[in-house]
Image (tube, rainbow, N blue to C red):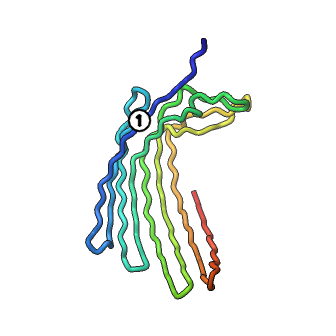
């Protein structure tokens, strides 16, 4: 008979949070440990913090270790036009971001705006690419560094039972 591939994953997660007495500053340290089959995945810690500078202005920052085991589809996909790759190895790296956000309320008008700068460096990133035969297959790319900016806002106005909203956003990578 034929044997069907299977994958088993187990993960544990823990976090420790701190909030200042006046709630103007909070931080969170978290850690995740995962097992993939019989292979242990490294601990993946994350540290994030937020500081309220004024009632309407907040700064934030996060740094985290990344580790991603190939998905079932990455390894075993067998549909027309694409084929998984059993030779893939996990992605690993670090990422961080720094952001600023603001909220202003005046009567029935509300403005929320935020901007975030991010940086990520990954080793062995899994990327699906077409081969010379036109079949899409995932491959590991040695080192990938990505950085960019994301900005978004929500502008809203309430008029009796109606609420009008505009949600512009921008992303550059």
Relative placement, left or right, of 13 versus 87 is: left
- Image quadrant for the C terminus? bottom right
Residue farthest to the top, as pictured: 1
Picture layout, residue 151 above or below residue 95: below
In the foreground, 124 or 67: 67
Q: Quadrant of the N terminus?
A: top right
Left or right of 130, for residue 20 = left
Q: For the point 54% across and 80% down, which residue is it?
A: 110
The residue shown at (50%, 70%) is 114
Q: How many marks?
A: 1
Query: In the current view of this chain or complex, which residue is farthest to the front?
Result: 161
Q: Which residue is mark 1?
A: 10
Outermost residue, bottom side = 107
Q: Residue at coordinates 66% horizontally, 27% vertically from top-left?
A: 78
Residue 80, x across and y down, in percent: 73, 30
The spot of residue 112 in percent (x, y) is 52, 75
Name the foreground residue: 169 vs 15: 15
Q: Residues within 10 Å of mark 1 (few under 14, many from 20)?
A: few
Q: Residue at x 55, y 26 (%)?
A: 86
Q: Nearer the viewer, residue 54 or 4?
A: 4
Counting from the top left corner in percent of width and height, residue 3 is at 57, 17
Taking the image as shown, residue 124 lies to the left or right of residue 81, namely left
Task: Give the vertical position of 43 relative to 134 (above or below).
Answer: below
Q: Provide the secondary structure element on which disc 1 rests.
A: strand
The spot of residue 158 in percent (x, y) is 60, 82
Quarter assignment of residue 72: top right
Classify residue 112 as left or right of residue 137.
left
Q: Quadrant of residue 85?
A: top right
């Amino acid at each position: 008979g034929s044997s069907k591939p299977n994958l088993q994953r187990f993960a544990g997660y823990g976090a420790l949070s701190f909030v200042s007495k006046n709630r103007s500053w909070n931080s969170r340290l978290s850690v995740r440990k995962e097992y993939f089959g019989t292979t242990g995945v490294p601990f993946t810690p994350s540290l994030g913090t937020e500081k309220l500078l004024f009632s309407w202005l907040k700064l934030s920052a996060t740094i985290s270790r990344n580790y991603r085991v190939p998905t079932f589809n990455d390894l075993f996909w067998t549909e027309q036009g694409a084929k998984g790759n059993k030779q893939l190895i996990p992605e690993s790296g670090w990422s961080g971001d720094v952001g600023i956000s603001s909220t202003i309320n005046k009567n029935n008008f509300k403005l929320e705006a935020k901007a975030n700068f991010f940086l990520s460096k990954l080793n062995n990133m899994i990327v699906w690419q077409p081969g010379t035969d036109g079949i899409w297959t995932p491959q590991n790319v040695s080192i990938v560094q990505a950085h960019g900016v994301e900005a978004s806002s929500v502008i809203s106005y309430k008029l009796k039972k109606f609420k009008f909203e505009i949600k512009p956003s921008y992303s550059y990578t």
